[in-house]
Amino acid sequence: MTRVLDASAVLALLKREPGHERVAALMAGDDCIVCAVNWAETAAKLADSGHPSPAIESTLAALNATIIPFDAAQAAACGLLRPATRHLGLSLGDRACLALARLNKATAVTADRPWLQLAQPLGIVIECIRPAP
């Protein structure tokens, strides 16, 4: 089954945060994709942390991830998720991940445990890489 990685999952891998082993295992296969919006969010978070541009570019390139362009269908699906996700404060990037997962009948992979509340209402399989508290 295809897995769509959220920026939080990619960042957990890069920062060796809890759950990074799961992301590494998923990325070792050939069924992970990342929305271009989440890729941009990952780069932005690394830049916010003070990493220089060349280091960010080489780090992301080394992941050898399959990046999916953000197209019109994803944009519409992402926008339509806003009412159902507003109460959790999901960002555009979060909704882009969920929209790509929904459109591809894939599993959304995140480090954000509150997303699990959305699985049933949205009809999307969601996996949280963080251990349960």
Image (tube, grey):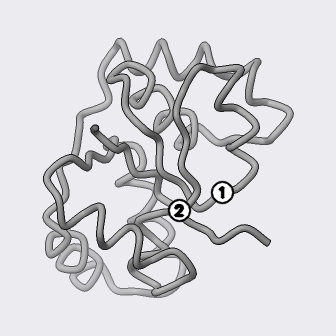
Q: Is residue 1 above or below residue 122?
A: below
Dot 2: within a 10 Å radius of its alpha carbon, few (fewer than 14), some, or many (20 or more) residues? many
User: Which quarter shows the C terminus?
Assistant: bottom right
Q: Secondary structure at mark 2?
A: helix
The residue sitting at 34% across, 14% down in the picture is 72
**Tag shown at residue 87:** none
Q: Residue furthest right?
A: 87
Question: Foreground: 3 or 11?
Answer: 3
> Does 15 sit above or below residue 104?
below
Nearest the viewer among 56 and 128 is 128
Tell me which corner region of the image, top left, top right, bottom left or bottom right, holds residue 1.
top left
Task: Report the residue at 24% width, 70% height from top.
Answer: 60
**Percent x, y for residue 91?**
64, 42
Q: Earlier in the sequence, mark 2 or mark 1?
A: 2
User: Is residue 114 positioned above or below 10 on the image?
Assistant: above
Per the image, label 1 sits on a secondary structure element best described as: loop
Looking at the image, which residue is at 46% across and 38% down?
A: 97
Q: Position of residue 87 (x, y in %)?
A: 86, 33
Q: Residue at x 46, y 87 (%)?
A: 16
Q: Is residue 17 left or right of residue 88?
A: left
Residue beneath label 1, please?
112
Which one is in front, 117 or 61?
A: 117
Q: Amino acid at mark 1?
A: Asp
> Which amino acid, by three-letter code, is at mark 2?
Ser
Where is 84 relative to 110, above or below? Answer: above
Spatial CA distance of label 2 from label 1 is 7 Å
Residue that numbered label 2 is attached to = 8
Q: Are marks 2 and 1 in contact (CB under 8 Å)?
A: yes
x and y percent of residue 39 in the render? 35, 54
In the rendered image, residue 32, in percent from the top left (x then y), is placed at: 25, 49
